[in-house]
Each structure stands twice: as structure tokens, then as C-alpha cells.
Image (tube, rainbow, N blue to C red):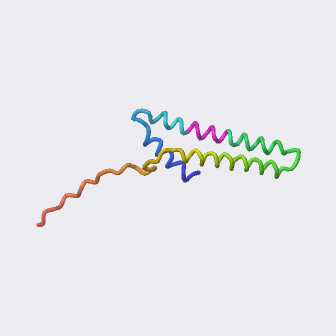
Amino acid sequence: MGLAYAPLSLMMLQKALPGQEGQASASLNLADVLGTAIGIGAGGAAVAAAAGGDLRLGITAALAIAAAVGVVALAFAGRLPAGRGSAPPVTQQVPARAEPPG
């Protein structure tokens, strides 16, 4: 996740309309926090449901939920429009001034 987060935030800021960078950044932060909270809640509920029985079953259910969410995310990622990626924009380089011989 750490390898994907920085390029994702760069892409969000790069694609944001001028003056809307704050809204784009807030949306990314909200999605990150909300996704974490829902994931921890679903996993915790699965483990708690198995607390009276086999704990391994609860942990397996929590991991299965996480895997299912990952598969759904991959399915939606295929629907995203193709773009240039998260590479920074190419800037024109100014040629160096040649010094006259002398």
C-alpha cells in the first residue's frame, strides 16, 4: 500500500481542476480513512463472531472478506480510463548557453 499511496495522491492532485486541489486531497483522505474503518470493522466482526468457537475460522473469514474486497476493487480498476499514469508532467529543458571560444 505504501508504494501505491504516494503516486495515487500525486495523480489526484495532478488531475484536479485548478483551485480544487483541496477538495481532491480531502476526498482521497476520506476514502482512505473510511476504507480503513470499514475494513477493520468487518474483520473485527468476523473474528468476534468466532470468539466463542474456533478463532481460526474467524480469522479466515476476515481474510476472505479482505480478499473479496480486493477482487472487487480490481474489477472496478479495469473500468478506469487509460491515462498517462502518475508520471509528473514533462517540462521543456532550456538549452545551456554555449560559451564563445576564447
In the rendered structure, the answer to whether residue 24 lies left or right of residue 69 reads: left
* Left-right relation of 5 to 16: right
Does 81 sit above or below residue 18? below
In front of the other: 95 or 8 = 8
Q: Which residue lies furthest to the bottom in this view?
A: 102
Instruction: Residue at the far right: name it.
Output: 52
Q: How many marks?
A: 0
Q: Is residue 31 in the magenta section?
A: yes
Q: In this view, does 102 lie above or below 20?
A: below
Vertical comparison of 37 with 93: above or below: above
Q: Position of residue 99 (x, y in %)?
A: 16, 62
Which residue does the image show at 23% across and 57% down from the upper left?
95
Residue at 51% in and 48% down: 6
Q: Position of residue 81 (x, y in %)?
A: 48, 45
| Residue 24, magenta (yes or no) | no
Residue at image x 29%, y 51%?
92
For the residue pair 100 and 32, the one nearer the viewer reads as 32
Question: Magenta segment range?
Answer: 29-37
Q: Locate residue 102: give its quadrant.
A: bottom left
26 vs 92, left or right, is: right
What main secondary structure does the magenta stretch of the protein show?
helix
Residue at position x 60%, y 47% in the image: 75
- Rendering coords of residue 29 (x, y %): 56, 38
